[in-house]
Amino acid sequence: MKKPTKVVEYNLEASEFNWDIAPGRTIEAWGFNKQVPGPVLKANVGDTLVIRVTNNLKEPTMIHWHGLRIPASMDGTGATQKPIEPGEVFEYRFVVPDAGTFWYHSHFNETVQLERGMYGALIVEDIIDPVSDGEKVFMIDDMKLNPANKFTKPGWFVPRIIERHDGREGNTLLINGKENSMIDIHAGQTERWRFINSSSARYFMLSLEGKEFKIIGTDGGLLEHPRTVTEVLITPGERIDIAAGPFNEGESFPIESLGYNRSTYLTAKRQTFATINVGERKPSIAFIPETLRRIEPLAKQDGVITRKVKLSVGPSFKDGMDFLVNDDIHVNDKPVKVGELQIWEVSNTSLMDHPFHLHGFFFQVIEENGKAPEYMAWKDTVNLPPRSKIKIAWTPDNRPGTWMYHCHILEHHAAGMMATFNVIDGDKPTDGMISNQAHHHH
Ligand code: C2O
Ligand code: CU
């Protein structure tokens, strides 16, 4: 049984405004509807979202709908649309085909616009979602501010090189745009908490002070089976949905990130992002079934590799280091055909982690360093630790156009670790698509 679908309309105004990340701690944010994050956009599977974006910034912008399988013309990148100039309005309109935790963010001058707050959550619900006693969305961020609460520009050479190398890690730990939030849950209840890592570069190793929780979903929606864990890594761009609780009345514990060593100059520390306070006991109707849904494997582990994507770093005269895809920067990769199974070997030959993100399509990781993965999931962002190799399988469905993949550490993306490619429909003309010869060097 399906719910009847509807048209859901939102207005998003991008502008500059003051935002308090803590009492008395005000930043000059850029964001949507004068809040950081922007409003949570919600729809049911099959609904049509109409989102009117008004740009009241002093510079152009574009909005990317991270994880949504929508037409290329709505993907919000420089490959598929003209930037929305100051004073202009652009209407994004698309059907949301999948349930899950998605997000929207600026895809223009990202290292500035996203860093200042231009992101928000987009939640798509379905009748097969497990029943919980409540739901919360947590967007992780870590803006980098100087003592006057101004955004820092890495002026001198050494910090600039470090940021380019490591990505920008901030000195504020934010959940939903706030430092040290107090978050309430009733004792005895189980809630669905949707985590989205919207930071530029911070690896978030979620822990609830060692308490067990169940992972129930990730980028492309529900897993097949809940996985009980005490920690889980959420890299920039990734989403993890958990079932949290039941907890005992009067308990209080942090939402924290355990140190994750991603082999950079920056050292990982255990850090508290917010505090959970467990209040008065309430009855529960939550039910998290042992089978959440089925995920059919797209390909066998030994299927024929159709493409190799190598992420690496190399010396650059100008900036200390270039971030490369197949030994080049800002690459135009070969097209793929609608309906043709893709098995890509994605490798990372560098000595640091990179979260690989594919726009517009879900993939399955079918092999990790020679081994089958422990469980099945639909992903759009996956971490590659240093010197690692994975195989991903995906099928371009009938949405021709220009798409891209890139490292979701924003500074690496900007420094060249990205590629565009066309999805082509047999012999149809490729109007409006980028040509394979044109190289965009930034
Ligand atoms: Cu969230 Cu091009 O990325
Ligand atoms: Cu990277």
Image (tube, rainbow, N blue to C red):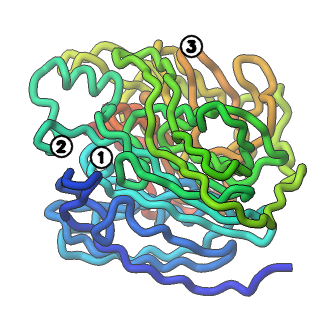
* Residue at the (48%, 83%) spot, across then down: 9
| 224 up-or-down from 408: above or below | below
CB within 8 Å, label 3 to label 2: no
Between 137 and 322, the one lying in front of the other is: 137
Question: How many residues crowd around disc 1 within 10 Å: few (fewer than 14), some, or many (20 or more)?
Answer: many
- Please state which amino acid type lies under the numbered disc 3: Arg
Q: Mark 2 or mark 3, which is nearer the start of the sequence? A: 2
Callout 2: SS: loop
Determine the image quadrant of residue 364: top right
- Please state which amino acid type lies under the numbered disc 2: Phe
Q: Mark 3 or mark 1, which is nearer the start of the sequence? A: 1
From the viewer's perspective, tell me whether residue 267 is left or right of residue 401: left
* Residue at the (22%, 67%) spot, across then down: 15
Residue identified by numbered label 3: 387
Report x, y in % for residue 368: 71, 23
Q: Mark 1 or mark 2, which is nearer the start of the sequence? A: 1
Callout 3: SS: loop
Between 239 and 285, the one lying in front of the other is: 285
| 256 up-or-down from 1: above or below | above
Quarter, ligand 2 = top left
CB within 8 Å, label 2 to label 1: yes
- Please state which amino acid type lies under the numbered disc 1: Glu
Give the spatial CA distance, label 2 vs label 1: 9 Å
The disc label shown at residue 151, or none: 2
Residue identified by numbered label 1: 115
